[in-house]
Amino acid sequence: MSGLPAGGRRPAVRRRVNPDILRLAVLASGRGSNLAAILEACGRPGFPVRVVVVVSDRERAPALERARQAGAEAVFHDPKAYGDRAAYDAALVATLDRHRPGLVCLAGFMRVLTPTFVRAWAGRLMNIHPSLLPAFPGLHAQRQALEYGVRIAGVTVHFVDEGVDTGPIIVQASVPVLPDDSEDSLSARILGEEHRLYPEAIRLFAEGRLVITGRRVLVKERA
Ligand code: GAR
């Protein structure tokens, strides 16, 4: 006996969807250690978030492999396959729309997104940057901090606006810069804080506790 009903077709099984779980999309270009920290947090009891899709602009990004291993869909969008940034971002929007995320997180996604993309996801688009913004935006933030000679460096999670690393700040954490620091040692110290802070910011969003008022983000007390 096959156990199938007459007619041989298995009845469609509806996946139960928990409306309290935030559907998260992550865009990542590289090694994906922040993605790994987010995936790990999603596995903790009571963490109200599920990664539904990871998109990368690099075919061999380890982030894509991490996504597959965690059972999330991994999508490569090849920049060379599109005529311009607008066409590329339109493809990104189409992929994201298919997965209906409530939040999109940039985790080492090394492309500047078009204003059209940013406007489409305004208030639902986060980025992590390895400096205490507004200091040292753009590339090589840790090197910029060392070269400037600051004593305190750190990390910022912020909502994305149309500028580069300029959106409203959600959370920040600082780390000391030690006299014998290299770019690698400082980056590693900052990265440790990144892995703690990004899941924390995502959880605050998932719990509906972030309110953007102008440039400021208020964090509401837990209800
Ligand atoms: C992280 O340090 C992140 O803050 C940085 O790229 C790295 C990605 O690492 N992002 C930026 O500099 C954005 N301007 P990961 O791939 O291991 O998460």
Image (cartoon, rainbow, N blue to C red):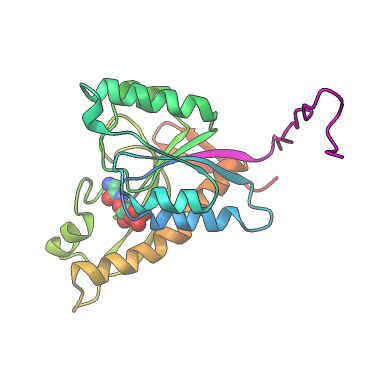
Residue ranking furthest to the bottom: 180
Front residue of 14/222: it is 14
Relative to residue 130, is residue 105 drawn left or right?
A: right
Please indicate, yes or no, whether residue 111 appears anywhere in the rendered image. Answer: yes
Residue ID at (16%, 57%): 144
Q: Quadrant of the C terminus?
A: top right
> Which residue is drawn at the image coordinates 53% and 52% (left, top)?
70
Q: Is residue 98 magenta?
A: no
Instruction: Classify residue 151 by image quadrant.
Output: bottom left
User: Please, is residue 123 above or below residue 33 in the view?
Assistant: above
Residue 181's spot in the image, x, y percent?
Answer: 21, 74
Which residue appears at 66% of the width and 48% of the height? 222
Q: How many marks?
A: 0
* The N terminus, quarter of image: top right
Q: Which residues are magenta?
A: 1-25
Q: Residue at x 29, y 25 (%)?
A: 88
Name the quadrant containing residue 54: top left
Q: Predominant secondary structure in magenta?
A: loop
Q: Position of residue 3 (x, y in %)?
A: 85, 38
Is residue 108 or residue 7 the one in the foreground?
Answer: 7
When the figure is inspected, residue 145 is found, relative to residue 127, above or below; the finding is below
Task: Check if residue 22 falls in the magenta segment.
Answer: yes
